[in-house]
Image (cartoon, rainbow, N blue to C red):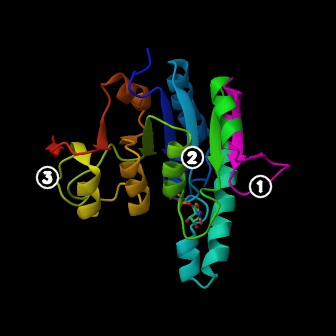
Amino acid sequence: MPDRRFKRILLKLSGEVLMGDGDGGLAIDPAVTARVAGEIADVQANGHQLCVVVGGGNIFRGISAAAKGIERATADYMGMLATVMNALAVQNALEAIGVETRVQSAIPMASVCEPFIRRRAERHLQKGRVVIFAAGVGSPYFTTDSGAALRAAEMKCDALFKGTSVDGVYDADPKQVATAKRYETISYDAVLARNLKVMDASAVALCRDNAIPIVVFNIREHGNFAAVLAGDGVSTIVQGEPADARL
Ligand code: UDP
């Protein structure tokens, strides 16, 4: 049974979740990507409709390249192309386990994938395909977090799931502070006011203005995506108004 609140989900995957473990790991590790695809397939099999937005930070990050002398807009376009590579890797891994997919890119690339067309994406979802959105919003000076919030709003998703390698939002960096506590729920405004590293401020604001809950969870932990949806996984939900609830 799908969680009735979250029938249609947008899953944001940071590029880093596709990386191999340890030093010298591959930027796109096929075994790791296959594991992530398995998590997506399980959730889809439970009756959820899935949009996926993939980042590119495992390959290329515009702002870092700009700091080393590449002009910022050019560096950002290079970053967007990196997200297309990741999108194809996720598509490949999903199709290898029998999940039908389509990739739509915000930068048209006719021989590689479809361009982003909202109505066509809607049709794919209705037919049970996973739609993978590449190239963020298609403009420099943005990130794929903003792309995820935008597509979640456009596709009328019930929630934005941010799949990372940490299991939620903490009141301090859990790697530095032993007493750091994970929030069970926290408001959009608290995330913005305390500058908590959940997503970019513009992405959080877009979710707030469109009342889209953001669920932060660890997608590298086997079974956690489906478990969070079933109500017994580990995550933090960023949503409107309720008082902070720390564990
Ligand atoms: N990017 C961009 N516009 C967008 C989305 C992405 O310019 O709408 C570029 C930007 O340079 C960014 C890179 O693509 O650094 C990779 O995306 P991101 O950093 O969001 O990837 P993630 O951190 O999620 O892996």
Side of 105 where 231 appears, left or right:
left
SS at circle 2: strand
Q: CA distance from mark 2 to mark 3?
A: 33 Å
Labels 3 and 1: the sequence-earlier one:
1
Provide the residue span drawn in magenta. 88-117
User: Residue 58's spot in the image, x, y percent?
Assistant: 56, 58
Q: Label 1, label 2: how many angstroms apart (C-alpha)? A: 16 Å
Choose mark 2 or mark 3, whichever is in front: 2
Crowding near the residue tagged with mark 2, few <14, some 14–19, many ≥20 C-alpha atoms within 10 Å: many
Q: Which mark is residue 108?
A: 1
Give the labeled residue for mark 2: 53
Disc 1 vs disc 2: which is toward the camera? 1
Name the residue at 66% across, 26% down: 99
Q: Quadrant of the C terminus?
A: top left
Amino acid type of the residue that numbered disc 1 sits on in the rendered structure: Pro
Q: Front-most of 156 and 23?
A: 156
Q: Does residue 32 sit above or below 148 in this rendering?
A: above
Dot 1: element: loop
Quarter, ligand 1: bottom right
Q: Residues within 10 Å of mark 3 (few under 14, many from 20)?
A: few
Q: Nearer the viewer, residue 11 or 6?
A: 6
> Could you tell me how far apart the alpha carbons at marks 3 and 1 are, in whole angstroms?
47 Å
User: Is 91 a magenta residue?
Assistant: yes
Residue 160 appears in the figure: yes
Kindly identify the amino acid type of the residue bearing the numbered disc 2. Val
The residue where tag 3 is placed is 179
- Horizontal relation, residue 104 to residue 151: left or right: right
